[in-house]
Amino acid sequence: MKPLCKEQRGMSRRTFLTLSAGAIFTSMMRHNAVAASNRQTGPEFIETTYQKDGGIKNRALIAYASRCGSTGGVADSIGQVLHGTGASIDVRVVGNVNDLGPYQTVIVGSAIRMGKWLPEAVEFVKKHRDALGQLHTAYFVVCLTMKDDTAENRSKVLAYLDPVRKEAPHIQPVDIGLFPGAVDFGKLSFVSKSILKAKGVAEGDFRNWTSIRTWAAGIRPALLGM
Ligand SMILES: Cc1cc2nc3c(=O)[nH]c(=O)nc-3n(C[C@H](O)[C@H](O)[C@H](O)COP(=O)(O)O)c2cc1C
């Protein structure tokens, strides 16, 4: 049987059916809060270290937040590109990172839910804002709006980061990667699935590995100085 992702473990169909329409929204917010404190491990979350001999000098962290795993794939792909150019890379879920001391470079990325980075990604930036202000940084965003890479959609998706900018206006990322993500209805809670279906969202994996790798290669000199 397919393992449940964190998304599904948070709320049962029965719970949903007992909720009134007004309570659905409240329930979703509660679900997010519960998941935020309980989502740091699981088979759907990639965490990797790509070690390079002598990589102490150029060590980068790619910290990401995800609900159903597609953002981890993006983070890992970025990590592979940067590792291939001579850096040691840690790919980690944001909640599993305590210390930025070992890193010269930090890339932070998140899936989008309801027009925002996931709360733990914003919390990560807030918690480490002083350190991040001293390091080379980049952000990335994984969402469905970027399925259509238009100027209008780019500007809409950049606005998703407003709460992040508000928390840490002094952090100047060298770039912000905007990437299409993936939706697998089989990994979503009944509520999330219903929301997407009501909006006519189609299932699929829209991640564009070429554009992710091109972005990573492009920001490498500014981030790692090599
Ligand atoms: C309940 C729900 C809400 C979403 N809200 C948005 C949104 O507001 N804007 C957007 O572009 N994509 C939205 N998405 C799409 C996700 O950002 C996309 O599927 C992403 O790849 C999920 O990443 P993950 O697999 O790492 O959790 C939403 C997806 C779900 C399930």
Image (tube, rainbow, N blue to C red):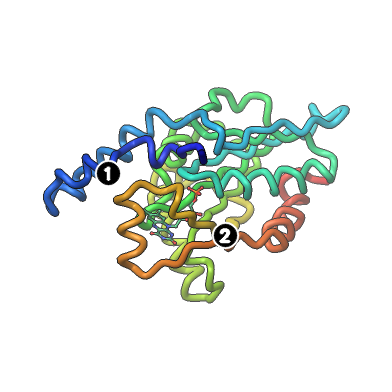
Nearer-the-camera pick, 78 or 103: 78
- Residue at position x 31%, y 58% in the image: 194
Q: Nearer the N terminus, badge 2 or badge 1?
A: 1
Residue shown at 59%/43% (left/top)?
72
Does the residue tagged 1 have its C-beta within 8 Å of any atom of ligand 1?
A: no
Q: Viewer-nearest of labels 2 and 1? A: 1
- Please name whichever residue, 153 or 106, is drawn nearer the observer in this view of the structure: 153
Q: Position of residue 171 (x, y in %)?
A: 53, 45
| Position of residue 39 measured from the top left corner of the image (x, y, whole percent) | 44, 32
Horizontally, residue 164 falls left or right of residue 30, namely right
| Cα–Cα gap, marks 2 and 1 | 25 Å
193 to 132, vertically: above or below: below
Q: Which residue is mark 2?
A: 205
SS class, disc 1: helix
Q: Residue at x 63, y 47 (%)?
A: 73
The kind of residue tagged 2 is Asp
In the picture as drawn, the residue positioned furthest to the right comes out as: 53
Crowding near the residue tagged with mark 1, few <14, some 14–19, many ≥20 C-alpha atoms within 10 Å: few
Residue under numbered circle 1: 13
How busy is the neighbourhood of tag 2: few (under 14 within 10 Å), some, or many (20 plus)? some
Left or right: residue 50 versus residue 99 is: right
Labels 2 and 1 touching (C-beta < 8 A):
no
Where does residue 134 sit, x and y in percent of width and height?
60, 36
Q: Quadrant of ligand 1?
A: bottom left
Q: How many marks?
A: 2
Amino acid on which disc 1 is placed: Arg
Rendered image quadrant of residue 205: bottom right
Residue 62 sits in which quadrant? top right
Vertical order, 169 against 11 (above or below): below
Q: What residue is shown at x 53% (from left), y 73% (from top)?
A: 148
The answer to whether the beta carbon of the residue marked 2 is less than 8 Å from any atom of ligand 1 is no
